[in-house]
Image (cartoon, rainbow, N blue to C red):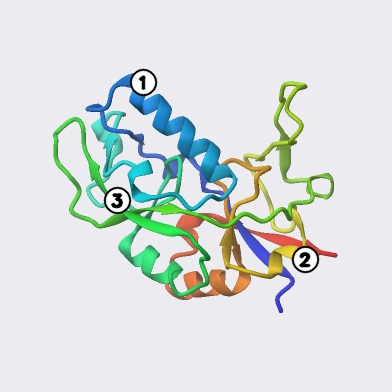
Amino acid sequence: MSSYVWVSHTGANRYRHFDFGLPHTMTLEERVAMSDSIDLDSRIGLSLPSDRFPNTLESIGRGSKLPIILPDYINWMCPVVSEKLADTLRTGDLGASNFYPVSLKRLDTGATFTQIFFILNIAVCKHALQPDRSSGLRERMMAQTVKQREFNLKATVSNDELVLSSSCLGGPDIWVDPMLPQETFFVSDRLYRSLESENLSKPLDFVRCCVSD
């Protein structure tokens, strides 16, 4: 069994952000409520039904920032992945995770991208991160009433700067850790190899992590 796993560092990569957000047909209150519920439940790896997610995401930035063809991975609150990337991820053990179809629309022109995308609801949580042994983390300042320590990945993280306990090696091949933001996720070495063989590991900006007893 491999002694490595991989973490996606896409959340800190500004080139993966295309300013997609919840549809403007929703009221502000509806957008806030949906965002808050997705944020809280995705961080702890809950399996969520399709009605908890939007059917459409709209660009909220300048249209000039959007390419004609979108890449295989789009940063949003949850991973948004192309059909090709979704098919490759499905070759692994994803536990109770879900793929929900989503349309990506340009607000400036009203045009919808013809590419097929899915919101990935990662429904596996593993408490394996060892923050005191991981130099690639920055601790978030939390209120004293919050007992759970929380972290972000540093803007630049090198291989082996995150350490996880060996408990992460069992079970599904993709998961979140509740000490990290919901857009940060891990994959097993075997799933990483599958993605790499299809030239799909680079869009996810993977960084290798150590596994220790």
Residue that numbered label 1 is attached to: 29
* Three-letter amino acid code at the position of disc 3: Leu
Residue at (42% x, 70% y) in the render: 88
Residue that numbered label 2 is attached to: 166
170 up-or-down from 81: above or below: below
Q: Secondary structure at mark 3?
A: loop
Residue 166 percent across, percent down from the top left: 77, 65
Is 20 displayed left or right of 180 in the figure?
left
Where, quadrant-wise, is the C terminus in this rendering?
bottom right
Residue 140 percent across, percent down from the top left: 70, 30
Checking the image for residue 213, the label placed there is none
Residue 209 percent across, percent down from the top left: 70, 59
Residue 164: image quadrant is bottom right
Where, quadrant-wise, is the N terminus in this rendering?
bottom right
Residue at (57% x, 57% y) in the render: 124
* Three-letter amino acid code at the position of disc 2: Ser
Residue that numbered label 3 is attached to: 70
The residue at the far left in this view is: 110
